C-alpha cells in the first residue's frame, strides 16, 4: 500500500512557489517559473524557423517574486558600481503601475530587438490588432511600455476583466520586429489560483 501512496503524496505536494520562499528556489525552478509555468510560456511561431518568444503575466505574485529574486541574484554576481538615476522608461512604467495596478493585467514579452517599435505604423498595428480574449469577450489593450535599458520586456496592459469563473484568457498579439509577428498565448484560469486567489 505504501508504494502507491508515495506518488500520490508527490502529486498532492504544493508547487515550490507556494511551499518555499523565493530565496530557496533553485535556478532551474526560477527559470521554469518565468518561462514554463501557469503564468509564463514560450509563444511559438508558425513553422519551425520562427523563434519562440517568452511571455509572462507580470503582476501575478509568483512572477513578481521570481523577477525580484532573479534581479537579486544578478546583483550578487556583479560588482557594485556607482548608483545612477533610474532609467526613464522603467520610471515611467513604475509610476504608471502605482496608479493602475488594481485595474490592469500586464503581459510582458521578451523582445530581442526594439527596432520594430521605432516604426509608428507598426506600433499602431500592434495597438489595433493585439487583443485579450476572455470567453466571448474581445478586449483591446489599454496601453504599452517599450523595453528600456533596465527592462528588456515590452509590457502590454489590458483591463483586469478576468474572473475565477472564466476558463481561459488568451492573448492574440501583433509584435513589431518579431519574425512571424502574429503570436498567441493561452493561460488556464484554474492553474493560476494560489491560496484561493487568482494571480494574474
Image: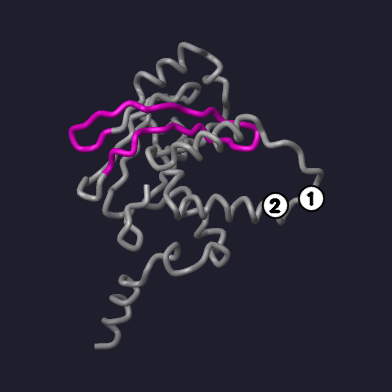
Q: Furthest residue to the left?
A: 136
Q: Position of residue 95 (x, y in %)?
A: 55, 36
In the visual, does 31 lie left or right of 78? Answer: left
**Mark 1, residue position:** 80
Q: Identify the mark at residue 188; answer none if there is no mark.
A: none
In the visual, does 6 lie left or right of 116? Answer: left
13 to 63, vertically: above or below: below
Point out the image quarter for the N terminus.
Answer: bottom left
Q: Furthest residue to the right?
A: 82
Q: In the structure shown, which secondary structural element does the residue marked by tag 2 occupy?
A: helix
Q: Residues within 10 Å of mark 2 (few under 14, many from 20)?
A: few
Q: Quadrant of residue 16?
A: bottom left
Q: Furthest residue to the bottom?
A: 1
**Do the residues under discs 1 and 2 have CB atoms within 8 angstroms?**
yes
Q: Position of residue 103 (x, y in %)?
A: 37, 38
Q: Position of residue 169 (x, y in %)?
A: 28, 40
Q: Residue at x 34, y 38 (%)?
A: 185
In the visual, does 122 lie left or right of 159? Answer: right
Magenta stretch contains residue 157 = yes
In the visual, does 37 lie left or right of 177? Answer: left
Magenta stretch contains residue 85 = no
The disc, 1 or 2, on the residue closer to the chain's N-terminal end is 2
Q: In the structure shown, which secondary structural element does the residue marked by tag 1 occupy?
A: loop
Q: Residues within 10 Å of mark 1 (few under 14, many from 20)?
A: few
Q: Residue at x 39, y 48 (%)?
A: 39
Q: Furthest residue to the front?
A: 99
Span colored in magenta: 133-162
**Mark 2, residue position:** 75
Q: Residue at x 37, y 30 (%)?
A: 183
Amino acid at each position: 500500500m505504501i508504494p502507491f501512496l508515495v506518488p500520490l503524496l508527490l502529486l498532492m505536494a504544493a508547487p515550490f512557489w507556494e511551499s518555499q520562499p523565493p530565496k530557496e528556489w533553485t535556478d532551474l525552478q526560477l527559470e521554469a517559473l518565468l518561462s514554463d509555468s501557469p503564468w509564463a510560456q514560450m509563444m511559438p511561431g508558425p513553422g519551425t524557423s520562427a523563434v519562440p518568444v517568452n511571455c509572462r503575466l507580470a503582476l501575478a505574485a509568483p512572477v513578481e517574486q521570481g523577477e525580484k529574486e532573479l534581479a537579486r541574484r544578478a546583483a550578487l554576481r556583479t560588482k557594485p558600481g556607482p548608483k545612477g538615476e533610474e532609467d526613464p522608461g522603467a520610471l515611467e512604467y513604475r509610476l504608471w503601475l502605482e496608479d493602475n495596478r488594481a485595474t490592469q493585467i500586464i503581459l510582458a514579452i521578451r523582445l530581442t530587438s526594439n527596432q520594430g517599435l521605432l516604426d509608428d505604423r507598426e506600433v499602431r498595428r500592434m495597438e489595433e490588432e493585439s487583443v485579450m480574449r476572455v470567453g466571448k469577450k474581445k478586449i483591446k489593450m489599454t496601453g504599452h511600455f517599450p523595453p528600456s535599458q533596465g527592462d528588456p520586456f515590452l509590457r502590454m496592459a489590458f483591463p483586469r476583466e478576468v474572473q475565477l469563473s472564466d476558463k481561459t484568457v488568451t492573448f492574440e498579439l501583433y509584435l513589431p520586429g518579431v519574425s512571424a509577428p502574429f503570436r498567441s498565448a493561452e493561460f488556464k484560469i484554474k492553474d493560476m489560483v494560489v491560496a484561493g486567489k487568482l494571480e494574474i
